[in-house]
Image (tube, helix red, strand yellow):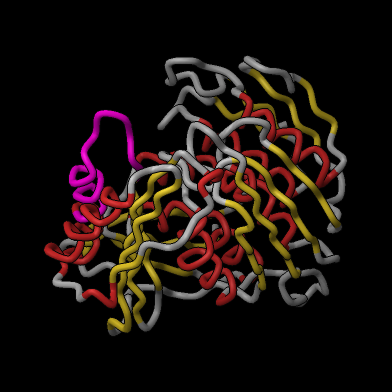
Amino acid sequence: MIEIDGSEGEGGGQMLRSALSLSMCTGQPVRVVNIRAKRSRPGLMRQHLACVLAARDVCDAEVTGAEPGSREVGFVPGAVRGGEYHFAIGTAGSCMLLLQTVLPPLLLAREPSRLLLAGGTHNPLAPPFPFIERAFLPLLERMGARVEAKLHRHGFFPAGGGQVEVEVWPAAAGADGRPALLPFDLTERGEPREAWGEALVAAVPRHVAERELAVLATAFGWREAQLRIPPLRANEGPGNAVVASFSCGQVCEVFAAFGEKAVTAETVARRVVNEARGWLESGAAVGPHLADQLLLPLALAVVHSGRATRFTCSSVTEHLRSNAAVIARFLPIDCRIEAQGAAQLVSLLPG
């Protein structure tokens, strides 16, 4: 049984989610100890427990330690099954992170799946729905997978209540007749195509959105047609999010920040501006969060195909390094990171 020490690296929930996902994909049992050891409240929170239970259901796993506050989980996977699943976080915890956990194994299942997810869709410290829909899923499609996601209801922190429907079709069959992802290089973002900003407000005054969009317009020189305030139902809030999207020839990048009490609209918008500028000025294909998301499915693709792959990112986070360490415990992969001008080049080579 593989043992993962959750106190190493970034020491958060990502190590647990990656370990569960890789266990399902490879059929290797895992024990994760010292779960979220570096967080102020260690152990399984409600949203992390939901990921463990969802993983259990998807592959009929034998699980130990699946209870609130647990700092150790044992997971012995069975065969991954496609089908219809309904997973609810029960709080405003991110259902996008739950999707992150079960999506890679479902892409390798033999049957399609339909997921109904309930919880947070626009959360701090988690990929929001627009990021998943516009940035991440199109790159999975380049790996031979097909995933369609629909947002039925926004779920902001701390209220939650979001609803997402996701349809998953397995990747095309590889040489052994089983579904397999295909690797690809992503070292350039391609020519700019379209860029736009959105300010979401639910049960929050409209002038907050207008002030946020004014900051984006000034920073990026955007015209009025590039600034949007999508209509939301009042009972979806309270909540506020600022989202900036940049569509290029090879990739679409999405950056977001979220309103908080006692934080001005301008400050929230400047967080988006600063992160987007870091990516724009680096010349890299992807930003730090998209790099985190890409690493695991690309590693699976490298192992299935026996071909190396590489991508450039604007910066390498501790999340990515921790993810690479977990991946190396399950897969014969060599992850190399080196500076390339203002960007970082991440190479994944078969071991």
Query: Quick check: is 311 in the magenta stretch?
Result: no
The residues colored magenta run 258-273
Q: Residue at x 23, y 74 (%)?
A: 224
Which quadrant of the figure contains the N terminus? top right
Residue 229 lies, in percent from the top left, at 37, 62
As rendered, which of 164 and 284 lies closer to the eye?
164
Judge whether residue 341 can be spotted in this image. no
As rendered, which of 22 and 56 lies closer to the eye?
56
Q: Is residue 38 above or below residue 338?
A: above
Q: Residue at x 27, y 67 (%)?
A: 284
Q: Position of 83 compared to 123: left or right?
A: right
Which quadrant of the figure contains the C terminus? bottom right
Residue 278 lies, in percent from the top left, at 20, 57
Q: Position of 208 compared to 14: left or right?
A: left
Residue 269 lies, in percent from the top left, at 23, 50
Query: Quick check: is 266 in the magenta stretch?
Result: yes
As rendered, which of 133 and 223 lies closer to the eye?
223
Judge whether residue 264 can be spotted in this image. yes
Q: Is residue 312 above or below residue 69?
A: below
Q: Residue at x 24, y 61 (%)?
A: 279
State how many labels appear.
0
Residue 256 lies, in percent from the top left, at 35, 52
The answer to which image quadrant residue 285 occupies is: bottom left
The answer to which image quadrant residue 69 occupies is: top right
Q: Residue at x 43, y 16 (%)?
A: 40
